[in-house]
Image: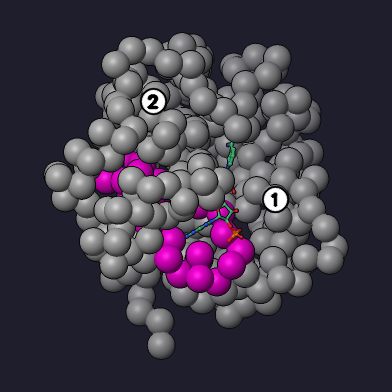
Amino acid sequence: MLLPMSTLMRTVTLPGGETVPALGLGTWQLGESARSRRAEVDAVRYALEIGYRLIDTAEMYGDGGAEEVVGEALARGPIRREAVFLVSKVYPHNASRKGMIAACERSLKRLRTGHLDLYLLHWRGSVPLAETVDTFERLREQGKIRHWGVSNLDVGDLAELWSVDDGERCAANQVYYSASQRGIEYDLLPWQRQFGVPAMAYCPIDQGALAGNASLHAIARARSATAAQVALAWVLRHPDVIAIPKAVQQAHLRDNFAAASLELTAAELAQIDAAFPPPVRKRPLAMN
Ligand SMILES: NC(=O)c1ccc[n+]([C@@H]2O[C@H](COP(=O)([O-])OP(=O)(O)OC[C@H]3O[C@@H](n4cnc5c(N)ncnc54)[C@H](OP(=O)(O)O)[C@@H]3O)[C@@H](O)[C@H]2O)c1
């Protein structure tokens, strides 16, 4: 018997007041081969069964294949699509007035849904931000998307976004953030906090590498946890950061979900600072 989501998962508040789960499921590298399709659909269904209610995907992943995997998992149930906060991303080269309307339709079709909960510009390209924002707003007015946001934008780009009409309606910025990539703490995270824009942390366990980190292991052992869980709990220590670890293995999916209720002590955070020093100057935005 599954407990209602609210009793299981912390939430993060979007601008406007809506709350979303602090931990969701990433889907990069899903949908790349027909051979693994069934296992991947089962993995997403399993994630939903154990309580995941936010899924991050993109038209880029598996060339649409990841969206299809998510769409099939939602269609097969038992968790209804309406219970899930669905995030997808548009390629920069599709983020134009004409291109994005069509790209969004394709994503909706693959995901077998009438709307996205959050639609992100995957990274900044050559289409002017004003045109992209205007098109996001049109899609929002048409009910095709509920919120829009960006990804891989640093402070300068966000400041520019804020200078275009409706740019401040941006609901989130998805960026690389993990114990070993903590440059955003210096300036981006404070900037976003000032404007009430949550961060979505991608690669929160460094594509699995932090699961093998000795310092995190040492902390984890004393808490009967895993190093990956400590890496995720560390990202989730901020009230305005959403983590979207990707996993297909059931044990990973369970561990990661449980990590949202692990609270690190001040002494443990200091140990992590010693292993992964916080930034003391501006760093270029990490990307993957
Ligand atoms: N906006 C962007 O530009 C951008 C860029 C990169 C990623 N993303 C998004 O962020 C998501 C997460 O990033 P990511 O997939 O690159 O990296 P990640 O979530 O840091 O790591 C995923 C890898 O870690 C393994 N793993 C997961 N949980 C584990 C655990 N508890 N113990 C040990 N290993 C574990 C997974 O293995 P298994 O799969 O075998 O379980 C997988 O190989 C992506 O899937 C995507 O949705 C966005």
The location of residue 259, given as percent across then percent down, is: 35, 60
- Residue 122, placed above or below residue 5: above
The residue type indicated by label 1 comes to Gln
The residue type indicated by label 2 comes to Ile
- Identify the image quadrant of residue 248: bottom right
Q: Residue at x 84, y 66 (%)?
A: 35
Numbered tag placed on residue 224 in the rendering: none
- For this view, does 200 lie left or right of residue 57? left
Please say whether residue 270 is one of the residues in the magenta stretch: no
Ligand 1 neighbours mark 1 (CB distance < 8 Å): yes
Residue underneath mark 1? 29
Label 1 secondary element: loop
The location of residue 202, given as percent across then percent down, is: 51, 41
For the N terminus, which image quadrant? bottom left
Please say whether residue 233 is one of the residues in the magenta stretch: yes
- For this view, does 141 lie left or right of residue 237? right
